[in-house]
Amino acid sequence: MAAGNFHQRRNASDASVLPNAGTNLDVSWDTLVRQDGTIVTYSDPNLQLDTGLYLIIYSDKFSTTNTTNNERVEIQGEIHAPSLGYVGGYGQDIIRKSSGQQSCVVSGMDIVDITADNTDVFIRFYRTDNSTSGTVDRVSGEGSVVIVQLDDTQDYGFYSTSASEATSGTTERTLQLDTNDRQDTGFSRTGAVVDVANAGRYFVTYGLDLSTTGTGREDVVGRLTNAGTELVGSTSFCYLRGIDGCQDGALSWGGILDLPAGADVDMRWSAPLSATITAAAGAYLKMWRLPAAADVAIKEATTGNYAAADPFVWDTLPFIDTDSFTATAGSSNIDVDQTDYILAFANFHQNAPDSGQRIYPEARFKVNTVVNAEGVAGVYHRNSGGSGIVSLNVAALMQVPGNASIEVQTVETAASGTMTNDSAQFAILSLESIFGPYAFPPSISGFNGGTNAFLWGAENVLIAGTDFGAVQGTGRVEIWDDESGTTKVTQTVDSWSDTSIQIDTVRGSLPDDTTVYIVVVGDGGVESAPFPVSVGLLGYSSAVDGLLMDHLWRLNNDYLDSGDTGPQRDMTVGVVGGGAFTTNVICEDTTHCWHINGTTVRREISDSENMNITNTLRRRTIGCWIQLNGTQKSFGAIWKEGGGVQNLAFLTGLGNVLLAQLADVAGSRDNVQAVSDFRLTPSRPYHIAMRYDQDDSPDARFELYVDGALQTVTDGNPMTINIFDTHSGDVTWGEPDNNLETGAVDVDYPGQEDTYMSYFFTVSENSSGIHDGALDPDDDIRDILFRRGAIPNTTISSDTQANMQTALDAVSSIPDWPLGIRVESPSSGSDLTLTADAITIDDRTTDHIEWRGSGTLTIINRNGSNIDQSKCWSATGGMIVVQEEVDLTLTVLDATDSTPIENARVRVTVAASVGPYLVGDVLIEGVTDASGVITAQLVYEGVDPSVTGRVRKGSASTFYKTSDIVGTVTSEGLTQTVFMVRDE
Amino acid sequence: MAYRDDIIALGPSHVYPFDGNNGTDIVGAETATLVGTASSTVLTEDASNSISTNGTTDSVDFPITDDINNATDDRFALCGWFLTDRINPPPKVIYADGGATSSVKFIMAFGNNLMLECEGTTGTPFIVQVYGPALQPNRAYHLAAVFESDVFGNQARLYVDGVEYTEAEPAGAAPGEALGVTRGQAALGSPVSALSEVGNLSVTLGAPVNGQFQFWAFWGDNADAQLTTTEIREELFEKGALPGVTISSDTEANMQTALDAIASSARPDEPLNIRVEAVSGGGNLTLTADAITHDALASIHVQYTGTDTLTWRNSNGSNASIGSTPNGGSIVFVTPQTLTVTVQDLVDSSVIEGARVYLTAGAGGPLPEGTVLMNEVTNASGVATVAFDYTADQPFTGRVRKGSSSPYYKTGPVAGTLGATALDTTVLLIGD
């Protein structure tokens, strides 16, 4: 243990219920964020410390989904060291359950003097309110607990109160510090005032445990002054509600102050409203004089609106140590010049009420624009009926790379008004300047060019960061399956420097298509924090979301619209029959699909300005996955919007012919039909999509795509009028209205016969997607909407090449299906060769192979396999090569009587190098059978090798003279008869 | 014999030529009623005009009679020629009889896709649908439907240009019952009775816009209604099809000249691309097509109306393969090839000049076994060639020898099969 060692933990997964009043929750911190040295032995919930002086900072978030009005949740936070009888680090916040304020943050800090080894310390939260509606749950991923061991040899002044005290009204009361808990050189106390002898920077914290017997809305405010002049950045606030058990609170603050020599520091507090507020005995003020080497930067502001303060901009720069920091006035950031551990503090204050009601601002820090959630603060206040005075304080420990830009984000999560700043301070303390040098662990800042994504087998992938070490030594890179590294696979390192490592990825037994974690282990065995990255492909759901549809009904066991543009239109209107959900699935990322189980079934949505009303849309794409579970005998309407005069519709009939139509005023507007080139196979999923773009040049066309393929038969193209007005007829799935105009005739179509449907979407130019409403036929309609959603008939799962070949050998045929075979990447290496032995794929199967590797998949067609390279694809950047294996057959006959010669020895080689065939490569070698035949196979690779060879039979009678062989292997193989002359 | 006589020879109950805007029945004297129709261009042989439904409510209403709609039919057939000049966007009726419960219909919709539907409620209700092709605008088609209950073939069959379509629901297209007696009045175009039903569900139906009709015929419930595929193809379709081009009767040379006039052309999607009449004076005829290709959807490539043999040589990529011989003649489609045999010394692979190559047809091919295919002597390059007209794969055997002058060689055997790709082989001989 040494001064400057620290330990930080966070809550990654705990969602414990904070019990109703009367029961404490001593929280667990399940995940180590970082540590230097080993100052904590953690045993949930205890942070066990040895003798020493420790700065402890905590913040934690809670929420409830219960919205029972006029109920409040008041949460207290404290630092406990029960064996020492110590309680401090007070914090408090309130969830009002109204105006959308469903969460709050409780934070606090303290300097705790641990006077015995193996002392357990924990953070306790508890409620005093009387609300019993719903539950209050801990929120994971926000906040942390930080413990920094301080240097006991430095100078400190710790003071506290021995008795409770109370105040009421706007007149400030000076906290009656009367006990010197510790007073080193440079500190003295006169009454309640602490005299600071030396100019310099000081870390200061204070805490008061409050309560009231009042029954109104009670504000309590606190601050530090130097002989009555407010020390900027030292304000605090607490809101108590004198009903519902919410009569408890705390004033809590900590930060960096730049004090002049002889400063007379006191803590003052008041209760601007009428009730009496009591501070319990044990309220404290603690000061740590930072050593001369300590580098600090301080910014201040007297303006700023919290609702639009991301990042908050600071007016002045009253103090900066340029050894460690770079900053300017009038900007948001303080830059840390070197790799460092920093303590950051920010304090905001409002002194005037506004018209707002219930306001809840939160604050966090940002490192290089990325929000750091390990330190968070929030404060609930009620301006109407309150004093309008409020403060918000946030603190965090952060590891930062060199030249890191540090900013503060403030957001209002439940505002009905705004909180306007009049006095704020932002301070950073460099721990490196005090306790350094630290052995910084490797820190990863980016992966694979900032994509933070890769594919298994990817090579030459760069990891960016700091403190990797100039040389690799015993260092390594691992990929973990989870944050704790349940499974770790060491990667192949190509190159290594202090800020960059290049690797070739190795999968081993790690998963695919999910999040994994990169960890750099330094030469000394120090691990970086796990850096999350995506491996493989995003799921179909995410891929479709990326197209930013106006409306998207996944129909995955609900009728909700999850489109991007909206407005949200759930398929819950005009329900007749309604169909049902079934666990049969027709596309990826689903567990259910919608079953249209009768010709009278229908569902509608409310009108949408991005479909049928309000806007005249020039670009649309509409589609879904569909499976007809039989041959449609009647005419069936799958979907339509509009009706008489104008409509868009999908229809089926005449033995599962699919029709898409755009109907407009007959004779004077565009009327277009597009028909599937084939009848849809029953019980086989298809992806269907209609598309038009009235701004297409040179021709605007209305098109139908099936499985991503443009259908050729249309009537009415190119469109010439290019106006498609709004069409107020209902948006209906299933049985339409009785006037669906088709070619100037109002046709009364029935509904759809037995059909499954998934992922119905519509998108227009009002989408914010780059496609502008007309999805790209290849990139979007085929490659994403169809291919990424196609469920393969067979999957060859990731394994060794041998096992994957065995799996493929079990396949004999592929029926008519969207995708025949999905081949995952092999468990080692990136390339893969598989032989398809007598595998016949139905000629109506849309895609034969999807390759999920990043290298080259070579498929060899053997024994009549018909895998077609033009129907193979890879969304993972892989290459696919399909090669044909051809037969090489020689028949050896007696030149005299043409009888077959058995046991003639044949050797045929490549005569001249061409393509992959090298001169001398042996193509046939062996002896003929009883029919005088010898056969071999060759993978034909697109070029025709010339061959040469000899046949002889001299080992047993009948003997023959040697005969020569010349010829050429073509795509048909080689078939040749060789005559031999007897030699007896 | 005139086309109408060819139809009548098959024993129909009623035949409506629609040769002009009239509903005359030339067999059963049951005149059809015309509603809004007009006279239009001819679709078939043996007529000057056709009848047209140029509005969605136009129709040809057939009389109510046992041989069309007014009887329980275990056997029933109808056929006729149809053309429309466009893709019809709304669902259309080409022909329909019956009401909602028992009927026979030709339906066209969704890109002019064709469907035959037969529905019955006698006994076990049934709906049989047979699916045909998408009918192309401005292209005449011969449509035929043959219905046989379980008493007979138990199948509904659809023919287009004499070719049967078998994609059906249910598969096999077995009705299992007879067509009911309650079928309503039959009509071409706009339905007469409440026929707005497909697949037993109501839908709005109308007449094809500018639909043309010619030579529609009906067979009532008798043996003649069991039309055979040959009758439908060769009598009802082939004999009525109008040609795109006719090579009229003349000397063979002049007929070749006439054919050369369409050299290097692509014959379109038609019922019949090229009709070739008999050569003047009769006898066999050989014509060479020079780069004449045929649309994949054309129903007849070459029709020969003579009584002898037409040899049609597909040269320069010509690809005629579908023939029609309505008058008893025959057509042989051949592809000219050059057979090449190269002869070399087995020891040093040097070419052998003056070797005789003798190939004859083996068994199993179109030529009589023993037919001489090549009897040539190799040139200075050791190569012998001969012209050959390929019709189908032809096995061959043969030998190569050189005994007339030194160096002498022993006889070398050669065998194989002549295929679509011209023979080009090398034979190695042993010095003797």
Image (tube, rainbow, N blue to C red):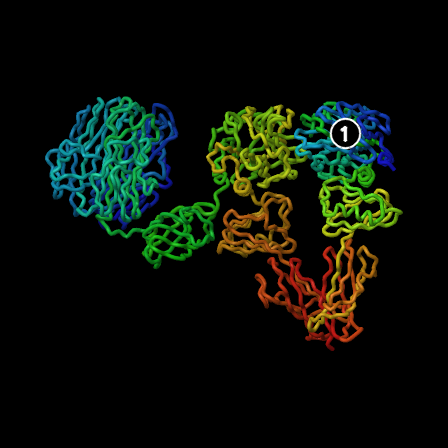
- Whether A511 is drawn above or below B178: the answer is below
Q: Residue at x 58, y 41 (%)?
A: A707
Q: Which residue is mark 1?
A: B40
Nearer to the camera, A970 or B128: A970
Residue A597, visible in the rendered structure: no
Q: Secondary structure at mark 1?
A: strand
- Taking the image as shown, residue A83 lies to the left or right of residue B197, namely left
- Whether A336 is drawn above or below B2: the answer is below
Q: Residue at x 71, y 43 (%)?
A: B295
- Whether A944 is drawn above or below A259: the answer is below
- Taking the image as shown, residue A759 lies to the left or right of residue B388, namely left
Quadrant including the C terminus of chain A: bottom right
Q: Quadrant of residue A580?
A: top right
Q: In the rendered structure, the residue with mark 1 lies on which chain?
A: B
Residue A91 horizontal/vertical position (percent): 26, 34
Residue B328 horizontal/vertical position (percent): 86, 45
Q: Residue furthest right?
A: B281
Residue A632 horizontal/vertical position (percent): 66, 33
